[in-house]
Amino acid sequence: MFLEDASVLWNTHVQSDYYRLGLRCHARYRHAIPGQFVSLHLPGQKSPLLRRPFSIHRLVETDGAVQGIEILYKVVGEFTQTLAGVGTDDVISLFGPLGNGFSIPVDVRRLYLAAGGVGVAPMMFLIRQLKKNNREITRCSLFLGGRTREEVIGESDFSALGVSVHVTTDDGSYGDQCLLTTPLEAAVQNDPPDLLIACGPKGMLACVAGIAERYQVKCQMSLETMMACGMGVCLGCAVAPSEIGSPYFHACIDGPVFDSQTIVL
Ligand SMILES: Cc1cc2nc3c(=O)[nH]c(=O)nc-3n(C[C@H](O)[C@H](O)[C@H](O)COP(=O)(O)OP(=O)(O)OC[C@H]3O[C@@H](n4cnc5c(N)ncnc54)[C@H](O)[C@@H]3O)c2cc1C
């Protein structure tokens, strides 16, 4: 992990409250693993005091050399509101890559991804990395859910990468009007994947974990647990283990990616 001052390459409004932030960073990020995150701080900003964690959405490469990373973020509070006002060439304190990342066993051919809202952020890096490594994924489906049409992010980008995308919205303004776990469960039942990957709100993750358990499918999930230090010092991001008597995990160093069977949501 590295602490550096990263200049802003772009900070572009996508739609609704969503933005893409490009940050120039050290080429050592070529070793970053999908699912890992970075923690950001805006120099000179006293509030909020604590750094904020964001998944790596994708690596920014020129002729195969890593020049930067891109973050996909949603404005929800003080930090992200200020972040939305940052301009090109401004400098942000960047700490990362942090956490463990997804681990896709070599025999995985059929992959289902479940992403709720901004939970889609780490999925792009994962798909691009699998393609880059010429992994033989014969079926890759993304179940992409949002509250409204404006909360459905990146559908065309995933389709362009050959991913079959199933969109759901809570209000029916786009795709099927249901929770993404409805088509996900039907797909898992009819045509089970080798691995299920999920990121999104806690309630969605609990439901996905239940589907994985019912149909005996391996499942890794990235938790967007609130955290402070991001490096295992403050112990603020405790995650309950499923094994009674085992010590608590900490999302920043043991995660944010967990096997769904090992934790209690
Ligand atoms: C490992 C990890 C990866 C993340 N990746 C991304 C990402 O790629 N893109 C992105 O937009 N966000 C991501 N987040 C969430 C992001 O860190 C928070 O949205 C951010 O800290 C909000 O800061 P804020 O000061 O703007 O809002 P705050 O003022 O801190 O919070 C505003 C509101 O949002 C709620 N909130 C804040 N953080 C979270 C959270 N993690 N889970 C649920 N509710 C929360 C607060 O309770 C409050 O109600 C990630 C979090 C983690 C732990």
Image: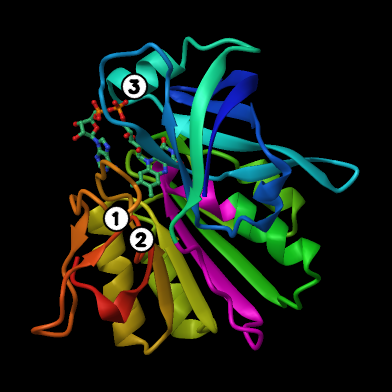
Residue that carries the numbered disc 2 in the rendered image: 253
Which region shows up in magenta?
A: 100-123
Circle 1 SS class:
loop
Q: Position of residue 158 (x, y in %)?
A: 66, 50
Residue that carries the numbered disc 1 in the rendered image: 232
> In the rendered image, which quarter is residue 41 located in?
top left
Mark 1 beta carbon near ligand 1 (under 8 Å)? no
Residue that carries the numbered disc 3 in the rendered image: 79
Circle 2 SS class:
loop
Question: What is the distance, in whole Å, between disc 3 and disc 2 at their CAs?
Answer: 23 Å
Specify few, some or many for label 3: CA neighbours under 10 Å numbering under 14, 14-19, or 20 or more: some
Horizontal arrangement in the rendering, residue 66 relative to residue 18 (left or right): right
158 up-or-down from 52: above or below: below
Q: Quick check: marks 3 and 2 in contact, CB under 8 Å?
A: no
Q: Quick check: marks 1 and 2 in contact, CB under 8 Å?
A: yes
> In the rendered image, which quarter is residue 148 located in?
top left
- Residue shown at the point (30%, 73%) measured from the top left: 209
Question: What is the distance, in whole Å, between disc 1 and disc 2 at their CAs?
Answer: 6 Å
